[in-house]
Amino acid sequence: MISLYRAIACQIIVEKHGGRLQVQSDLGQGSEFCIYLPICSQ
């Protein structure tokens, strides 16, 4: 259950920075989390 809360918190943080969170889960294999954030040009 803690990993669910961690994923939700991560998604909120990523969205606030204009990014996105992609999750892929395979039963019995685990989950893969990909975080995409925009590159700042300053």
Image (cartoon, rainbow, N blue to C red):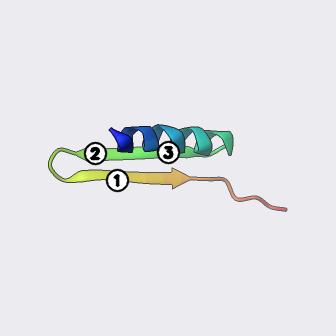
Q: Which residue extends farthest bottom?
A: 42
Image quadrant containing the C terminus: bottom right
> For the residue labelled by badge 1, is the local secondary structure a helix, a strand or a loop?
strand
Residue 30 or 18: which is nearer the viewer? 30
Q: Position of residue 40 (x, y in %)?
A: 76, 58
Picture layout, residue 5 above or below residue 39: above
Among numbered discs 3 and 1, the one appearing first in the sequence? 3
Q: Position of residue 11 (x, y in %)?
A: 53, 40
- The crowding category of the residue bearing disc 3, from other C-alpha atoms within 10 Å (few below 14, some 14 to 19, many at least 20), is some
Which residue is label 3 attached to?
A: 21
Image quadrant containing the N terminus: top left
Picture layout, residue 35 above or below residue 13: below
Q: Disc 3 marks which amino acid?
A: Leu
Which residue is label 2 attached to?
A: 25
> For the residue labelled by badge 2, is the local secondary structure a helix, a strand or a loop?
strand
Q: Disc 1 marks which amino acid?
A: Glu
Which residue is label 1 attached to?
A: 32
* Left or right: residue 33 compared with residue 41: left
- The crowding category of the residue bearing disc 1, from other C-alpha atoms within 10 Å (few below 14, some 14 to 19, many at least 20), is few
Residue 16 or 37: which is nearer the viewer? 16
Among numbered discs 1 and 2, the one appearing first in the sequence? 2
